């Protein structure tokens, strides 16, 4: 059995105990599906999401399809209120047919009974065309809960002009990254090589993932929670050291402070993911040609990546239009037309989970902002290095809220990153125990 398949088998315990009962009762499925155009009239779908290029994709789909028509509503990103809006709509019985959900949050929506099993409309042959790690993250309890759209391997974006000005070499290891950070600060007392995001545990989790951590592991009927393993401890101590030495900024992600520091050149780099290429391009058009992309620094200099975000398309439990919703989701995620429409919008640098469509994404993305660099080749290599051993737990919201609350207090002292990670661990154990699940950790 491959490593990725072993991971999938372990994740199956996500739907054990009380969670299995919820999923069985609320799953929905093929018997509720409405075939596209079955009554001679177009099936009308509602779709909620926030990813860049979504409106352009919907417009392209509607223009090319007569049997299905989609109404799109842009909502805040998941952790900025989008997930709460989706959850409330499901509870109220007025949810859209299709929603965007990132991989980390999918198990929680599944365990709450908010989604449908779409396996009857998404074949094994179709899944084989996708990055295995993405398929594993959408397969819970042996069921298929979403169509993977993009993978999100990590990458390091940097101002090549300022690196050259300060004589800083692009780091390939985390030791080199620290040395480069020291050199940047010495060259310009106000400048920093990158930013720690206190509001975004997912970036920290991706770095723990890259280092080999396994926070959530399901074995038989037991969830094993471990945020204090050697890999996480190493990452935590490293970033605490950078913060204590003042070698990185400490600003909220995508905040005016962060954006302003990019614009005035006091932040030289961004530790992000493949989708970050579009973010920087859209945020800093006046800096076109000044940025480049490098592999994420690793602990030993060898290619290694976690996954930072990444999105899927899931059908809500109340939808009676399952078949049409999945057809639209697959069109967005697995067709040349869908990927071209999204990336040609100029705002998205999505790295498709559908491996055959990466050349399409590359052709559709104007890499002039990065001096014509082949950033998709870099993403390809990073994507191949994503560890298949990470699984998300069924209470990610609880985990991240506890970590985020304490990350925000680190700057003022008295609270450390280790305290925050422990708080996330304790909150997760308490929540899963409250749900009646067997927990070790």
Image: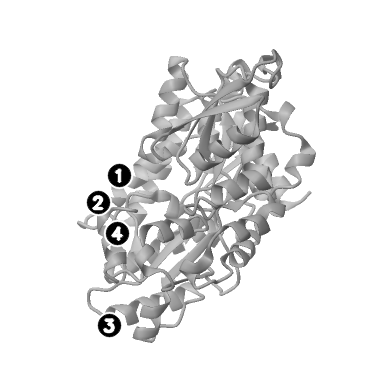
Sequence-wise, the earlier of marks 3 and 1 is 3
**Residue for point 72% across, 29% down:** 121
Q: Of discs 3 and 1, which sits in the foreground?
A: 3
Calculate the distance from the C-alpha at mark 1 to the C-alpha at mark 2: 7 Å
Residue at the spot of label 2: 409
Sequence-wise, the earlier of marks 4 and 3 is 3
Judging from the image, the colouring scheme is one colour
Q: Position of 32 compared to 156: left or right?
A: right
Calculate the distance from the C-alpha at mark 2 to the C-alpha at mark 3: 27 Å
Per the image, label 1 sits on a secondary structure element best described as helix
Q: Where is residue 300 in the image (x, y as percent from the top left)?
A: 56, 73
**Residue, far bottom:** 167
Q: Where is residue 340 in the image (x, y as percent from the top left)?
A: 61, 50
Per the image, label 2 sits on a secondary structure element best described as loop
The disc at residue 186 is 3
Sort mark 2 into few (<14), some (14-19) or many (20+) by Cα contacts within 10 Å: some
In this rendered view, identify the residue nearer to me: 381 or 358: 358
The disc at residue 365 is none
**Residue for point 28% across, 71% down:** 245
Residue at the spot of label 1: 405
Residue at the spot of label 4: 258
Sort mark 4 into few (<14), some (14-19) or many (20+) by Cα contacts within 10 Å: some
């Amino acid at each position: 059995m491959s490593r990725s398949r072993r991971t999938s088998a372990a994740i199956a315990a996500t739907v054990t105990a009380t969670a299995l009962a919820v999923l069985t009762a609320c799953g929905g499925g093929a018997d509720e599906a409405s075939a596209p155009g079955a009554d001679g009239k177009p099936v009308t779908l509602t779709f909620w999401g926030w990813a860049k290029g979504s409106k352009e994709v919907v417009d392209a789909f509607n223009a090319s399809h007569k049997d299905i028509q989609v109404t799109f509503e842009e909502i805040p990103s998941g952790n900025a209120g989008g997930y709460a809006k989706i959850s409330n709509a499901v509870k109220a019985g007025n949810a859209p047919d299709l929603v965007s959900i990132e991989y980390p949050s999918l198990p929680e929506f599944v365990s709450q009974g908010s989604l449908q099993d779409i396996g009857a409309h998404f074949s094994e042959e179709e899944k084989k065309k996708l990055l295995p790690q993405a398929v594993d993250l959408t397969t819970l309890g042996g069921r298929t809960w979403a169509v993977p759209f993009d993978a999100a391997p990590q990458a390091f974006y940097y101002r090549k002009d300022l690196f050259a000005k300060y004589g800083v070499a692009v780091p390939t290891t985390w030791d080199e990254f620290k040395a480069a950070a020291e050199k940047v600060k010495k060259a310009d007392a106000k400048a920093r090589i990158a930013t720690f995001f206190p509001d975004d545990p997912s970036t920290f989790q991706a770095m723990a993932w890259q280092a080999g951590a396994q926070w959530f592991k399901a074995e038989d009927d037991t969830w094993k929670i471990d945020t204090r393993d050697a890999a996480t401890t190493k990452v935590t101590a490293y970033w605490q050291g950078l913060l204590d030495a003042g070698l990185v900024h400490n600003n909220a992600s995508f905040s005016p402070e962060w954006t302003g520091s990019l614009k005035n050149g006091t932040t030289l780099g961004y530790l992000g993911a493949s989708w970050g290429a579009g973010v920087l391009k859209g945020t800093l058009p006046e800096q076109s040609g000044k940025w480049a992309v490098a592999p994420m620094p690793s602990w030993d200099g060898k290619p290694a990546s976690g996954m930072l975000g990444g999105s899927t398309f899931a059908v809500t439990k109340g939808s009676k239009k399952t078949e049409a919703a999945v057809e639209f989701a697959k069109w967005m995620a697995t067709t040349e037309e869908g990927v071209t429409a999204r990336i040609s919008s100029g705002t998205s640098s999505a790295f498709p989970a559908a491996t055959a469509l990466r050349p399409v994404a590359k052709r559709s993305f104007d890499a002039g902002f990065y001096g014509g660099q082949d950033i998709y080749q870099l993403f390809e290599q990073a994507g191949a290095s994503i560890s298949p051993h990470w699984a998300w737990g069924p209470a990610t919201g609880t985990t991240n809220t506890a970590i985020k609350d304490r990350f925000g207090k680190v700057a003022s002292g008295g609270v450390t990153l280790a305290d925050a990670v422990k708080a996330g661990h304790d909150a997760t154990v308490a929540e899963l125990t409250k749900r009646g699940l067997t927990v070790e950790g």
